[in-house]
Amino acid sequence: MNRTRAGLLAGAARAFADHGLRRSTMQSVAVAAGVAKATLYNHFRTKDEVARALLALELDRLSATAWALPTEQALSTLSDELGAHPVLRRLAETEPEVLTALLTTDRWAELTGRLAAALRIDADAAELAGRWLLGVVLQPGRSTTRHRHAARLSAVLGAAPVAPVAPVSPGAASG
């Protein structure tokens, strides 16, 4: 990613944290990035496009962070990052409906899939970890408490053997 685009996304993060997603404008993003609005439009056509690019960048960053760490430490780090993330904090406090829209069924599957890959866990474990991390976004609590919970969750994720699920044939009766 070039320096200009990185600066634009950093400005977008500041604008979204300061004003929320709905109240931010392309002008406020440009001002926060310290560029002319035309420069912003050279890279992004709409505010939604800026928000999608920022989300993708953050997901890549968090996935890379988690991938490099053991599960317990990855969960602790993710909980700290998500619990203190300025844009997520703003959305949780003032625009919960926007946050909810980010977690629609299709996006949730993508998020838990990325979490499964980053933590090297199966889909069910990723679903459990994802729901815990969503709770952190909504109610961060104290870092020390999150770290204790991350340790317990890591133990549960590591202790639960994954039983293979037999495929169900289309004509099988359910019981």
Image (cartoon, rainbow, N blue to C red):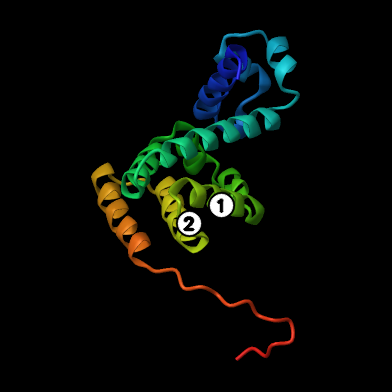
Three-letter amino acid code at the position of disc 1? Gly
Left or right: residue 42 versus residue 84 is: right
Residue at the spot of label 1 = 113
Residue 164 against residue 154 in the figure, above or below: below
Q: Residue at x 35, y 60 (%)?
A: 158
Residue lying at 65% horizontally and 27% vertically, measured from the top left: 50
Query: Is 109 drawn above or below residue 70 in the view shown?
Result: below
Residue 21 place in picture, x, y as percent? 59, 33
Residue that mark 2 sits on: 126
Image x and y of residue 127, in percent: 49, 59
Which quarter of the figure has residue 173? bottom right
**Label 1's element?**
helix
The disc placed on residue 141 is none
What is the spatial separation of the Cα atoms under label 1 and label 2, in whole angstroms?
Answer: 7 Å
Q: Quadrant of residue 52?
A: top right
Image spot of residue 5 (x, y percent): 62, 17
Q: CB under 8 Å between callouts 1 and 2? A: yes
- The residue under label 2 is which amino acid type? Ala
Q: Residue at horizontal 30%, vertical 59%?
A: 155
User: How far across and down, in percent of the image, does residue 48 sit?
Assistant: 69, 32
**Quadrant occupied by the C terminus:** bottom right
- How packed is label 2: few (under 14 Cα within 10 Å), some, or many (20 or more)? many
Quadrant location, the N terminus: top right
Choose top left, top right, bottom left or bottom right for residue 84. Answer: top left
Total numbered circles = 2
